[in-house]
Image: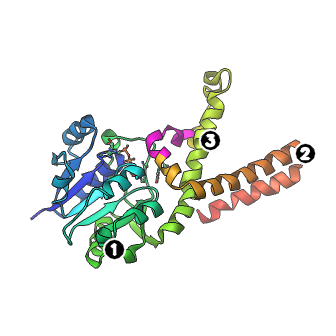
């Protein structure tokens, strides 16, 4: 019998997960739930799901439930689940992990696996879904000792079938790392975009944009709703990461103002070494 996978949130991450699993040898049936009716229609016509339902109760009959909605929504849904079959596995793919992990009611903790796939794009909604989003990428599985043995096995198999590399970490440590590698860079990209858009004639400036500017500003196109929630949940770590960046930027400014070109050159050389480990 086909494994029933319920996907709550039929956007980039939920839709791409379904497309990835459809390529595996397992037989799956995908049931979707999304509060945006247009997204439900699109998900059906794009073949991301086999059927859509309107209530959590209908999703609760699935073997596996995937939560791919903004991170505050994940916490709200987790608290509406009440009871689950002991064999049911719920996996959230939110970009933050500590607040989500802490919010799971004790009686459901074994049902849950909190995961963060370190892959995505600046696009959103069902039409953004692509079948190779997860392939060859890292997924961080957090606080796994809190998940049931059955749920751990199911989650590991699912992500392995999606051809992902599994990394295990505590949720707290994950959030600090994610602030530096993902959340602060998104804040910078939004800031970069706004700093250009607030100039007198942004269009003439942007007309000259080359690869560097396009690379650095791409993620400024990301969903404000999704990122507002992430910044809220990871506020403390994000502020720390922004402060670290501000210190470096101030140092750069100081060296330029004071024409300390040799020191500046060394500072840039230090930055080059990032690429030895990336
Ligand atoms: N976009 C990215 O690159 C990545 C996103 N994530 C995480 O994955 C999750 C989903 O992100 P995306 O798929 O990019 O977003 P998305 O905006 O493409 O899709 C989210 C979908 O959820 C629906 N939705 C929102 N709240 C809902 C609710 N309460 N009930 C039912 N449906 C609801 C929306 O209508 C939309 O269709 C977020 O938690 C995000 O932090 C994780 C890794 C990468
Ligand atoms: O588009 C990009 O380059 C990203 O960095 C996408 C992304 C967004 C959110 C995440 O939690 C993980 C990855």
Residue 181 included in the magenta stretch of the image: no
Sort mark 2 into few (<14), some (14-19) or many (20+) by Cα contacts within 10 Å: few
Q: Which residue is drawn at 28% across and 66% down?
A: 158
Q: Which residue lies furthest to the left in this view?
A: 1
Q: Does the residue labelled 2 lie within 8 Å of ligand 2?
A: no
Q: Quadrant of the N terminus?
A: bottom left
Which SS class for mark 3? helix
Q: Which label was assigned to residue 212?
A: 3
Which of discs 3 and 1 lies nearer the camera? The answer is 1
Main secondary-structure element of the magenta-colored stretch: helix
Which SS class for mark 2? loop
Which of the two labelled residues, at mark 2 and mark 3, occupies the earlier sequence position? 3
Residue 220 included in the magenta stretch of the image: yes
Q: Residue at x 35, y 41 (%)?
A: 128
Which of discs 1 and 2 lies nearer the camera? The answer is 1
The reply, left or right, for residue 19 in relation to residue 212 is left
Q: Mark 2 points at which residue?
A: 258
Which SS class for mark 1? loop
Tell me, yes or no, whether the two marked residues, 2 and 3, touch with CB atoms within 8 Å.
no
Q: Which residue is drawn at 69% across and 53% down?
A: 243
The reply, left or right, for residue 2 in relation to residue 263 is left
- Report the Cα–Cα distance between label 1 and label 2: 55 Å
- Tell me the magenta residue range: 217-228
Tell me, yes or no, whether the two marked residues, 1 and 2, touch with CB atoms within 8 Å.
no
Q: Give the camera-side residue of 174 and 58.
A: 58
């Amino acid at each position: 019998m086909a494994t029933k996978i319920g996907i709550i949130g039929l956007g980039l991450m939920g839709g791409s997960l379904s497309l990835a699993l459809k390529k595996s040898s397992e037989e799956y049936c995908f049931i979707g739930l999304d509060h945006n009716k247009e997204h439900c229609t699109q998900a059906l016509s794009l073949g991301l799901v086999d059927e859509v339902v309107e209530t959590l109760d209908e999703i609760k009959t699935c073997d596996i439930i995937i939560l791919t909605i903004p991170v505050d929504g994940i916490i709200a849904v987790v608290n509406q689940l009440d009871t689950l079959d002991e064999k049911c596995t719920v996996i959230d793919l939110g970009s933050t992990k500590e607040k989500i992990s802490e919010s799971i009611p004790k009686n459901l903790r074994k049902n849950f696996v909190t995961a963060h796939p370190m892959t995505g794009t600046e696009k959103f909604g069902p039409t953004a879904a692509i079948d190779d989003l997860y392939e060859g990428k890292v997924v961080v599985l957090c606080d796994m000792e809190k998940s049931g043995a059955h749920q751990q096995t199911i989650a590991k198999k699912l992500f392995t079938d999606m051809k992902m590399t599994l990394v295990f970490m505590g949720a707290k440590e994950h959030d600090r790392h994610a602030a530096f590698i993902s959340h602060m860079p998104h804040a910078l990209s939004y800031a970069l975009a706004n700093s250009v858009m607030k100039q007198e004639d942004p269009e003439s400036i942007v007309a000259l944009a080359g690869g560097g500017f396009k690379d650095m500003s791409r993620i400024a196109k990301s969903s404000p709703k999704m990122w507002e929630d992430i910044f809220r949940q990871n506020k403390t770590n994000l502020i720390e990461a922004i402060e670290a960046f501000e210190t470096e930027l101030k140092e750069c400014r100081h060296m330029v103002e004071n024409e300390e070109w040799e020191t500046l050159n060394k500072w840039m050389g230090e930055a080059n070494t990032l690429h030895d480990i990336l």
